């Protein structure tokens, strides 16, 4: 089918297929068993943890009003989680 579409009789192919037709590679040496990596379970190491814990301390509706006054669009506020609202309020100076 491809040969019929080409104007030339002898076409140079970009890659030659191996004799077996597929890609087979031999691995020398022994192989180790693959084990899934386990994430460490440490709490209190990131900013997200502290912001998520602080959401109970603040009135989220009051923070939203303060962020609106500072110029944050309401469409963006609707997308943010309570932890993100607290974090943005801290960075914009609504909370000290």
Image (cartoon, rainbow, N blue to C red):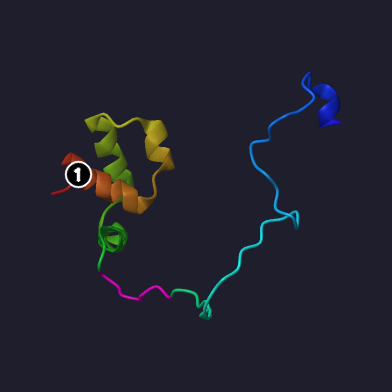
Q: Residue at x 31, y 46 (%)?
A: 85
Identify the residue at the far left of this view.
96
Task: Locate residue 53: give its quadrant.
Answer: bottom left
Give coordinates of residue 72: x percent, y percent: 30, 32
Q: Residue at x 73, y 29 (%)?
A: 11
Identify the residue at the far top of this view.
7
> Magenta residues?
38-44
- Most common secondary structure along the magenta stretch: loop
Residue denoted by label 1: 91
Taking the magenta stretch, the answer to whether it contains residue 23 is no
Give coordinates of residue 54: x percent, y percent: 26, 60
Figure check: 50 above or below 65: below
In front of the other: 41 or 23: 23
Give coordinates of residue 56: x percent, y percent: 30, 61
Figure check: 92 above or below 55: above
Q: Is residue 9 left or right of residue 81?
A: right
Figure check: 95 above or below 53: above
| Quarter of the rendering occupied by the N terminus | top right
Give coordinates of residue 10: x percent, y percent: 76, 28
In front of the other: 45 or 28: 28
Q: Residue at x 24, y 31 (%)?
A: 69
Task: Locate residue 80: give its quadrant.
Answer: top left
Mark 1 is surrounded, within 10 Å at the Cα level, by few (under 14), some (14 to 19) or many (20 or more) other residues, namely few
């Amino acid at each position: 089918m491809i040969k019929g579409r080409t104007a030339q009789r002898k076409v140079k192919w970009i890659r030659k297929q191996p004799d077996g037709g597929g890609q087979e590679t031999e691995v020398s040496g022994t192989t180790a068993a693959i084990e899934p990596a386990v994430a460490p379970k440490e709490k209190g190491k990131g900013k997200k943890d502290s912001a998520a814990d602080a959401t109970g301390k603040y009135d989220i509706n009051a923070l939203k009003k303060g962020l609106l006054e500072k110029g944050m669009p309401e469409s963006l506020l609707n997308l943010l989680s309570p932890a993100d609202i607290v974090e943005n309020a801290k960075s914009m100076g609504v909370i000290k």
